[in-house]
Image: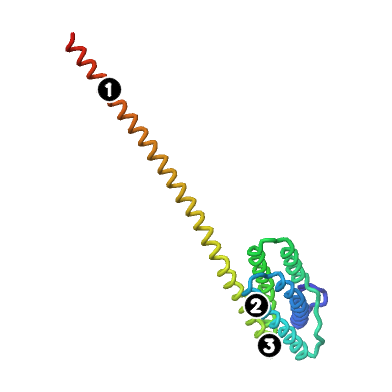
Amino acid sequence: MGLFFKDIKTMEDLYVHGLQDIYYAENRIVKALPKMIEKTTDGELKRGFETHLKETENQVKRLERVFAMHDRPAQGHKCPAIDGIIREAEDVMGDIEDQDVLNTAIIALAQAVEHYEITRYGALMAWANELGHRQSAKVLGETLKEEKATDAKLTAIAERKMNPRADKSRSGVARKKSAGSRKKAARSAGKKTTRSSARGSAARSAKKTGRKKSAAGRRA
């Protein structure tokens, strides 16, 4: 968001520029989501993105309502931040071959988008209230709730998908440790048995030697 443009002199200027920023971002997201839906192989995640695409299309319309409330044309202002996040998502989706890893990465990238939107809508709602634009703040608040709900759903999906894999990983490590402990115990037991056998052999040898000496003494 180009917050430090020379044309921003008042809170109203800042607020309008913020609206233009998020309007541009939402339209970029509408174009990016179909690619994420196409790349996603997890059914639950795919359905979630399809639902959010419809929500995002409605969010664009909400912003157009807000612009109309201020008698301004609905237009976007290029936003390097959202461009960077989406560009990263496209690069990552093209590089990862493992489907489970790809789905996990897509969730993280989608949440990066959500967190950006949550930050922007939160600021815009606060600014609208401060400027006395109560109705605009209410409309922006509706979208903010949706963005937070989407972020929470993505977190829940990530936890459901990742925890079983983490449990399997931990189980594998535990099995390796257990097997290692058993081998170590077996080696230790083997060493003790060897030492015990050696001591037994030495004792028997000593007794035998003693008997021979005793017999030799009696003969003498």
Q: Nearer the viewer, mark 1 or mark 2?
A: 1
Distance of label 1 from label 2 (alpha carbons): 83 Å
| Quadrant of image for the N terminus | bottom right
The residue carrying mark 1 is 206
Q: Is residue 212 above or below residue 13?
A: above
Position of 213 with respect to 153 (left or right) is left
Question: Which label is found at residue 139?
Answer: 3
Secondary element at tag 3:
helix
Element type at marker 2? helix
Residue at image coords 23%, 19%: 210
Residue 47 disc label: 2
Amino acid residing under circle 2: Arg
* Residue 202 spot, x, y in % from top left: 31, 25
- Mark 1 or 3: in front is 1
Camera-nearest residue between 208 and 50: 208
Which residue is at the front of the view, 133 or 142? Answer: 142
Q: Measure how far apart labels 3 and 2 are at the Cα level.
A: 26 Å
Image coordinates for residue 143, horizontal then vertical, percent: 67, 83
Specify the quadrant of the image occupied by residue 161: bottom right
Viewer-nearest residue: 130 or 47: 47
Q: CA distance from mark 1 to mark 3?
A: 99 Å
Could you tell me which secondary element the residue under label 1 belongs to? helix
Q: Residue at x 51, y 54 (%)?
A: 173
Specify which label sits upstream in the sequence, 1 or 2.
2
